[in-house]
Image: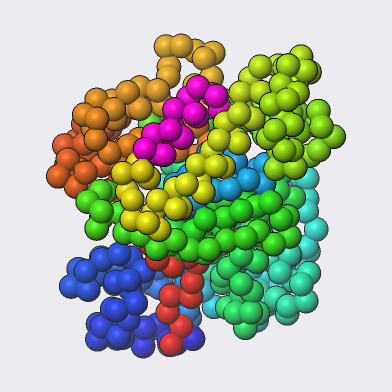
Amino acid sequence: MLTIKTLKQNLLDGVYDAKLARVYCKDIKNLQSVHDRICRVADSWMKEFGKNADDAVAIFSAPGRTEIGGNHTDHQRGKVLAGSVDMDALACAAPNGTDMVNIFSEGYGLISVNCRENEARKEEENTTVALIRGIVSEIAKKGYPVKGFDAFVTSDVPGGSGLSSSACFEVLIGVIVNDLFCGSNLRPDEIAKIGQIAENVYFGKPSGLLDQMGCAIGGIVTIDFSSVDTPFFRVVTYDFAKAGYALCIIDTGADHADLTGDYAAVPAEMKAVAAYFGKEVLVEVDEKDFYRELGKIREKTGDRAVLRAVHYYNDCRRVVKQVEALENNDFDTFLKLVKESGQSSFMYLQNIDTFRKTEKEPVAVALAVAEHLLQGKGAFRVHGGGFAGTIQAYVPLDMTDAFKAGMDALLGEGACRITSIRPVGGITLIEE
């Protein structure tokens, strides 16, 4: 750790510039906004916790993530392709010598959790307190001497944007605890699984592991979740910009408030198909057996469940082909597979709209406008959970300005975000 005074001087002297340029996907000559943000988070830490520039701290970062392939496949322990993005949650933190974990999140205020009280609480479900308690408690249960700390957190990963702001926050807290109390011995995939436990058990949301793994590991990563305890993952090296394309995430601006049932129905219906075979999730059901029993499954589960299972098998297969295409530098095939995934989500997965209110179909409209603006080039698809939220597009670089202007005109200024794939996941950004 280092004093805030030293931190600021090192920033002025450019000590961290090479690392910061890599992490934030910026030219080394264009880092002033990054420097300013780090100084601001340090100043805010001093203000909120009554500290001064001679106090020692460390700076931590965890990125948001984008789903590149495998829509709603992770909760069935299938295959996915994910990437961390150049938006992150940033924290200044230090141990405080007590049992209290104090986290001040910009725009939300202070949350305090006693790290000795480590059981899930029903009354805390669906709260940030639950996530913090879950992460701290699960790490402590591994035998690490977790103590209290003070952290100030700011984030430019927008909530509800499909970029996994909650998983980003979970990974950030895990990285802080790992550095301060675990000797950085926890691997990124372990931090991801701890975040999932916090979300499943303490927060009460039955999510898969895609979001946390995408935020924790960094870069483009392909993950096979077939093994519960040890998901297989590896990094796929590829630069979309060098292929002549920008990756755009477009926020439809729709409200998720009344969509919990719609999201929950997707894994529930897929699991109903698996249950027909006496299994828990679809990865345990051979695709040949599924098609052989299709008629009987329809009678048992209904047609939408069957169609969602069809999507699952096809999208897992597409992930493998997407990885092969990127590794073979065959971007045209990759784009073709992106389009196929989007079409499958629309036709079979059916997570574009609820169809309860046909006058409001924001994702479908955004997809239609993206298709119009791209004029047969690039690719586009629903991104993440669906029903509301975001879509994703791969846009030729010479069309990016016009595409962004067109999407922003439909959905509001800033709706279209041009993103880069960040090469690293959750990290201790600065500590010496």
Q: Is the magenta stretch mostly helix, strand or loop?
A: helix
For the record, the magenta segment spans 336-350
Residue reaching furthest to the right: 278
Judge by depth and name the residue closer to the eye, 114 or 353: 353
Q: State left or right for residue 415 relative to residue 383.
A: left
- Check residue 149 for magenta coloring: no
Examine the rendered structure and indicate whether residue 312 appears above or below residue 325: above
Image quarter of the C terminus: bottom left
| Residue 354 visible in the current orientation | yes
Q: Where is residue 399 in the image (x, y as percent from the top left)?
A: 17, 40
| Residue 180 visible in the current orientation | no
Please tell me how many numbered marks the rendered image carries: 0
Q: Position of residue 329 (x, y in %)?
A: 33, 56
Examine the rendered structure and indicate whether residue 322 appears above or below residue 41: above
Identity of the residue drawn at 36% across and 38% down: 336
Examine the rendered structure and indicate whether residue 417 appears above or below residue 154: above
Q: Where is residue 391 in the image (x, y as percent from the top left)?
A: 39, 35
Q: State left or right for residue 290 relative to residue 335.
A: right
Identity of the residue drawn at 22% across and 51% down: 244
Q: Where is residue 179 in the image (x, y as percent from the top left)?
A: 57, 78
Identity of the residue drawn at 40% across and 82% down: 4
Judge by depth and name the residue closer to the eye, 318 or 133: 318
Judge by depth and name the residue closer to the eye, 260 or 292: 292
Identity of the residue drawn at 44% across and 61% down: 236
Examine the rendered structure and indicate whether residue 256 appears above or below residue 123: above
Q: How is the image coloured?
A: rainbow
Instruction: Find residue 272 and report its image quarter.
Output: top right
Judge by depth and name the residue closer to the eye, 273 or 157: 273
